[in-house]
Image (spheres, helix red, strand yellow):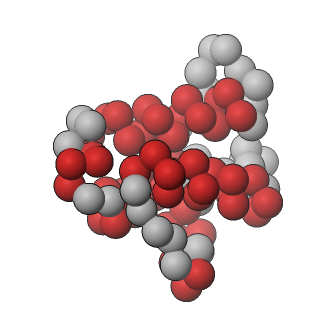
């Protein structure tokens, strides 16, 4: 996957699953999911499951924190650190 593909996959999933939007993800990539009301903590679990399955990563309990997960940018960066190289390249 290309650099933008991780972000695009996350944006598309959120738009379809949480926003019920056919018009894509209308927020900037650094918008906080929690502060903007895009996703709550229970939805975050669903999003993490999606990213785990899509990119072949395991999110450890101690890594399930705002700094890793609370925006498209943060989640994509975290995913790239955890994912096998071929999953994100």
Who is closer to the viewer here, 81 or 84?
84
- Please give the name of the residue rendered at 40% of the width and 50% of the height, measured from the top-left corner: 55
Side of 74 relative to 48 (left or right) = left
Decide if residue 26 is on the left or right side of residue 1: right
Task: State the quadrant of the C terminus.
Answer: top left
Which residue occupies 75% across, 31% down?
A: 19
Closest to the observer: 66 or 49? Answer: 49
Q: Residue furthest top?
A: 22
Q: How many marks?
A: 0
Tell me where residue 57 sits by quadrant. Answer: bottom left
Q: Is residue 53 above or below residue 7?
A: below
Whether residue 14 is visible to the viewer of this picture, yes or no, is yes
Residue found 55% across the figure and 62% down from its top:
69
Q: Position of residue 79 (x, y in %)?
A: 39, 58
Q: Position of residue 52 (x, y in %)?
A: 50, 57
Tell me what residue is drawn at x 71 percent, y 34 percent. 17
Compare residues 54 and 48 and report the one nearer the observer: 54
Query: With 63 as the anchor, is 81 left or right in this view?
Result: left
């Amino acid at each position: 996957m290309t650099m933008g593909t991780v972000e695009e996959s996350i944006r598309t999933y959120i738009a379809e699953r949480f926003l019920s939007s056919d018009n894509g993800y209308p927020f900037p990539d650094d918008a906080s999911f929690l502060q903007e009301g895009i996703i709550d903590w229970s939805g975050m679990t669903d999003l993490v499951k999606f990213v785990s399955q899509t990119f072949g990563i395991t999110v450890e309990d101690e890594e399930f924190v705002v700094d890793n997960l609370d925006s498209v940018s943060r989640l994509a960066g975290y995913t790239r650190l955890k994912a096998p190289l071929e999953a994100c390249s």
